[in-house]
Structures are given as C-alpha cells and as structure tokens.
Amino acid sequence: MNTPAKPYNLLRSFSALSLLTIVIISTASAVLLSRFLRETLLERNGLLTLEFVQSIAQSQNTSLYFSEPDVNKRQGPLDDFFNRIAHMPDVVRANVYSRDRVVLWSTEKPLVGRQFPENNPELDEALRGHLALHTGRVEAHSKSEHILFAPDVEEFVENYIPIYGPSGIVVGVVELYKLPRILWETIARGQRLVWMSAALGGLFLYTVLFWIVRRASRTITHQQQALVEAEQWALVGELTAAVAHSLRNPLAAIRSSAELAAETEDVASRECLGDIIVQVDCMERWIRDLLLYSHQPDGNTQTANLSETLRQSLAGFSDRFTRQGIILQVALPEPSPRVCADPQLLRQVFNSLLANALEAMPKGGQLRVTAERRGRQLTLALRDTGTGLSSEQLAGVFKPFVSHKQRGLGIGLALARRIVQRYGGHLELHSQPSKGATAVLQLSLAE
C-alpha cells in the first residue's frame, strides 16, 4: 500500500537550509577577516620596528661592527646601539646574531657567544634580507634560544630584523621579543567588531530572506487554496446549471396544475393553491437569480436597503423562531443604510446565517442582530447562544462541500462568503464550544 507523500513545506526547508548556509558563510567570513586583521596589524607593527631599528643602525653606522673580529672594539658601539633597541616600547628581550648565527649581544647574558646552527625559519628569512615575524606562547623550549617568560605572559611577538652593511649585504639580524599589550587589545577589539558585524549582518540577512520567503509561501498557499476553491465552485456552477434546468420544467408543471385546480376548488383550497403558486414563483426567481449570479461580473453597482432586506429574511423564519422559543433582538441604525449588494443575493446571505443560527439553538436561546457604521463600511453582527463550534470545525466552515450537519451540503456559508466578497465585503465566523457563535458581515456603504 502506497502511503501519500507529505506536502513539501517550503518555509520549513528554507528556514533550516538558509540558517545553516548563513551561519557557515558568516563564520567563515569572520574567521578570514579576523585573521587578516591580525596579520595586517602585526605586519604593520613589525615594519615600523624595522624602519626604526634600521634608521638607528644607519645613523650610528653600527653595521661595521657586526664583522669586527676584535670583541673589545665592537663591544662599546654595539652596547650603546643595542641598549637603545632593548629599551624600545614593549621590547622585553633582544638578541643580535652575526652572519654565521653567533649571538653577538643579548639581554640574556648566558646566550652571548653561543651559535645556533639548527633550523630556524624566521632567522633564515631575516638573513635573506626579509622581515620575519613569529607569534606564540612560549610554553616549552620550541627553540634552543628561547627562555620562558613569566607565567602571566600570554603571547609574544618575535621580530627578526635584518641589518644591512654599506654594500647592501645583510651583516646581522636583530631579534626582538615584544609584548605589545596595546596592539593585542586593538586586535581583540577589531576581532570582536568583525564577529559582531558578521553576526548582525547574518541575522539581518536571514530575517529579510525569511520574511520574503514566508510571504511568498503564504501567497503560494493562498493561490493554491484559490485554485482548489475555483475548481470546486466550477463544479458547483455546473451542478447548479444542471439542477436549475431540471427543476424549471417540473416547477412550471406544478404551477400550471395549481392554477387549473384553483379554478374549480373551494375558497379554502384556492388559498392553499395560491400559496403553492407563490412558493413556486419564489423558487423560480431564486433559480433565475442563481443562474444570473454565476455569470455576473464582479463589482456590479447594485445597492440594497439593509433593514428592509434583513426584515424580509427574518419574516421568513418567524414561525421557526416561535416554535423553538428563540428570543430575537434587532438593533439597526436609522435611517436604514444602503449597501453595495444585490438585494436578492444579500437576502440569500442572511437566510444562510439565520438558518445556521436556528440549527445551533434547537432548544431555544437568544439571537441578537446589531449593525454599526465604521467609516465607509457597515458591520453587521449576528450573535447566537447555540452549541458553538470547535476550532477544527471553524477552520472548514467556508470550504465548499464541508459540512458538520447530518443533512448539510456544505454550500450555504461558502456561497454566502463568495457573494459578500463579490461586492467587496467580508464575512467572518467566531465561535467557541458551548458559547455560541458570532457571524460578522462587513459591507461597503453605497455612495
């Protein structure tokens, strides 16, 4: 047995997929921008340090002493130069390497004179004449020249700055350990701003896209419902035309028979036959109006007297009001307003609403009919004290062929709403179980 496929939920699928996509894109963008911001600021800080160190080296002609074999001759000038370097802002340690990787000067005295021939990518890069940067936490001796900082030091910046001789050849390298707390704070603020912008931008984009898709989903749903309803009403129209065509001939025969019988029967019989003729004419008129309604263009300019049309409908149900013990209260504005609607079709709307109210109060109750003007609209409310409807029943009351009555066809309220909508009005039904129901009808006032 094949199970029916579940309808595709556009809004749910879009919500999940778009949220996942936007989170991935926003996160990736924030990571890349944060990394770019960090590397750019570190590089700019390193370039400023390089320019400062090289300018001092050139002004004091310090590069000559890097290749000086006599320790006593080079000690004085180098000490003066490198002491200045060591006291630069944020510098906590400094090492000076010769061309052959020997430490010529260092703030850590045990390192002076030692050679570090092992692989050091940053030192190799600086000896080739390029600024080299390295950041990290000195938690272990990753390099033999490293000496652990205090426990409170979270991260350091290691700058390898090449020193050029008079011929433009690299004669040595200055290694500076810096703890640029202001730089780290600046980077942290910038990264927080990047992540916040990515989060807010992603949230805004998701909200806008969700709103658009939700509106599109609602439009598609309404259009689907309209298509289904149009198909149902097309079927109703075909059935109506067939039934109307089939009924008109029997009704004509009934009327003719009643007219002939009225000529020969007594007075009491003629009164009954006259009622038959009147009802047949009424049915004929309703059939004709129904056929005309199915071919009328929307928005015709007919008007109806609200009070007169409503009282005609109430008069048709007066016997049932009395038999069921229903108290009727009517409060209509004076003078009676005229509304945009066909009188016969508006009466059909009232008949459907009154019939439903009576069926909801088989053991008596109260029906209150009120109307009030609201600008260019007139609002009519019919409130009964009947059994009421559940939320599930209320959801389908205006759908064709959906009925909760044993002998109902499910066309009355659907046709009533369709008639009202044709004249630019609106019909709603509010109800709760055991608390009655209220039908609210809105119509445009005639000019």
Image: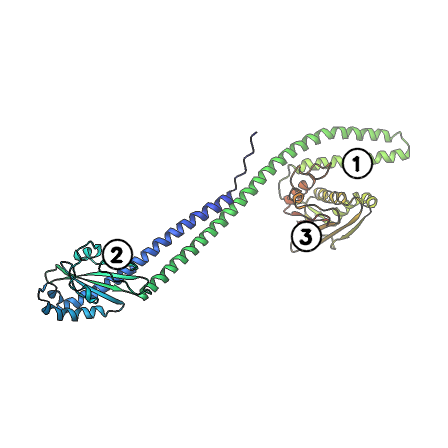
Using a 10 Å C-alpha cutoff, classify the residue at mark 1 as few (fewer than 14 neighbours), some (14 to 19) or many (20 or more): some
Q: Position of residue 76 (x, y in %)?
A: 13, 71
| Amino acid type at image mark 2 | Ser
Name the residue type under label 3: Leu
- For the N terminus, give its image quadrant: top right
- Mark 2 vs mark 3, foreground winner is 2
Q: Is residue 271 left or right of residue 435?
A: right
Q: For mark 1, what is the residue?
A: 279
Residue 292 located left or right of residue 19: right
Residue at point 62%, 34% (across, down): 234
Q: Is residue 18 above or below residue 175?
A: above
* Quadrant assignment, res 333: bottom right
Mark 1, secondary structure of its residue = helix
Q: Distance between the residues labelled 3 and 1?
A: 32 Å
Q: Mark 3 points at which residue?
A: 378
Q: In which quarter of the image is residue 192?
A: bottom left
Q: In this view, does 312 lie to the left or right of 94?
A: right
**Quick check: can you spot residue 300?**
no
Classify mark 3: residues with Cα within 10 Å, few (<14), some (14-19) or many (20+).
many
The quarter holding residue 195 reads bottom left
Colouring used for the render: rainbow
Q: Are marks 2 and 3 in contact (CB under 8 Å)?
A: no
Element carrying mark 3: strand
**Rendering coords of residue 292 (x, y %):** 67, 37
- Residue found at x 67% / y 32%: 239
- Left or right: 39 in relation to 172: right
Instruction: Kindly state the secondary structure of the residue where label 2 is placed.
Output: loop
Please name the amino acid that badge 1 sits on. Gln
Residue found farthest to the front:
110
Q: Which of marks 1 and 2 is nearer the N terminus?
A: 2
On the image, the x and y values in percent for residue 330 come to 77, 52
The residue that label 2 is drawn on is: 142
